Amino acid sequence: MYLTRLLYFSECNPELDPCIERILSSARTRNEVEEVSGALWFDGKFFIQALEGQRLAVSRIYHRIAADPRHCNIELVACEAIDTRLFGEWSMGYLAATKRNWANIFKFSGHRELKPREMSPESMLKFLLALEHDD
Ligand code: FAD
């Protein structure tokens, strides 16, 4: 049917332990079943996530994620019809805030710290694509 890519960022809820391993494990299991692929950046403060797959599957998963108390201030950055997946290799690739990945921040955000609110949808997507995955 219709392939869709959705991009959002959010802030980690400081009152709950985000336990990224647990998030990734449940994301990967469920996304695989729904044939959804994507990537997730987490730096201790912000999550940035791309989800791609059939429109209904992406929509269903996004609504579940948006209701998750482990993060807040979710901002939808883009949601568009696509012809091909960019993150097709990963049910949910983890983009960790390693030294190497951190070096890309200035290039894409224009600041030494990550300011997702100031990033265009294009920069945010390019940022995710430029990072090394930590599987
Ligand atoms: P259950 O696992 O039964 O949990 C019930 C409720 O508790 C849900 O609202 C859940 O959000 C919440 N919850 C679960 N664990 C905790 C916890 N440790 N502390 C506090 N509340 C908790 N899921 C996907 O399927 N695909 C993804 O790509 C994906 N990405 C995510 C990205 C982020 C940044 C976050 C925070 C979560 C992500 N999740 C993803 C997890 C998703 O939000 C749901 O927790 C998961 O899909 C299970 O949903 P459920 O309704 O079966 O909830």
Image (tube, grey):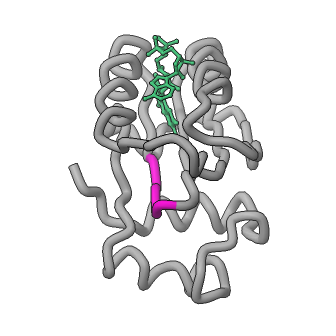
Q: Position of residue 124 (x, y in %)?
A: 62, 62
Front-lying residue, 104 or 53: 104
Q: Residue 94, relative to residue 2: is it above or below?
A: below
- Name the residue rendered at 29%, 30% in the picture: 25
Q: Residue 135, relative to residue 61: is it above or below?
A: below
Residues in magenta?
A: 40-44
Front-lying residue, 80 or 27: 27
Residue 24 falls in image quadrant: top left
Any part of residue 27 in sight:
yes
Front-lying residue, 49 or 87: 49
Residue 103 falls in image quadrant: bottom left
Q: Position of residue 13 (x, y in %)?
A: 60, 46
Outermost residue toward the left? 135
Q: Position of residue 86 (x, y in %)?
A: 46, 46
Seen in the image, is 37 located left or right of residue 119?
left
Outermost residue toward the front? 15
Any part of residue 3 in sight:
no
Dominant secondary structure of the residues highlighted in magenta in the image: strand
Seen in the image, is 79 located left or right of residue 107?
right
Instruction: Count the numbered circles shown.
Output: 0
- Name the residue rendered at 54%, 35% in the picture: 51
Seen in the image, is 19 located left or right of residue 61?
left
Quadrant of the drawing holding the N terminus: top right
- Name the residue rendered at 67%, 29% in the picture: 66
Based on the picture, tell me whether residue 91 belongs to the magenta stretch.
Answer: no
- Name the residue rendered at 73%, 37% in the picture: 79
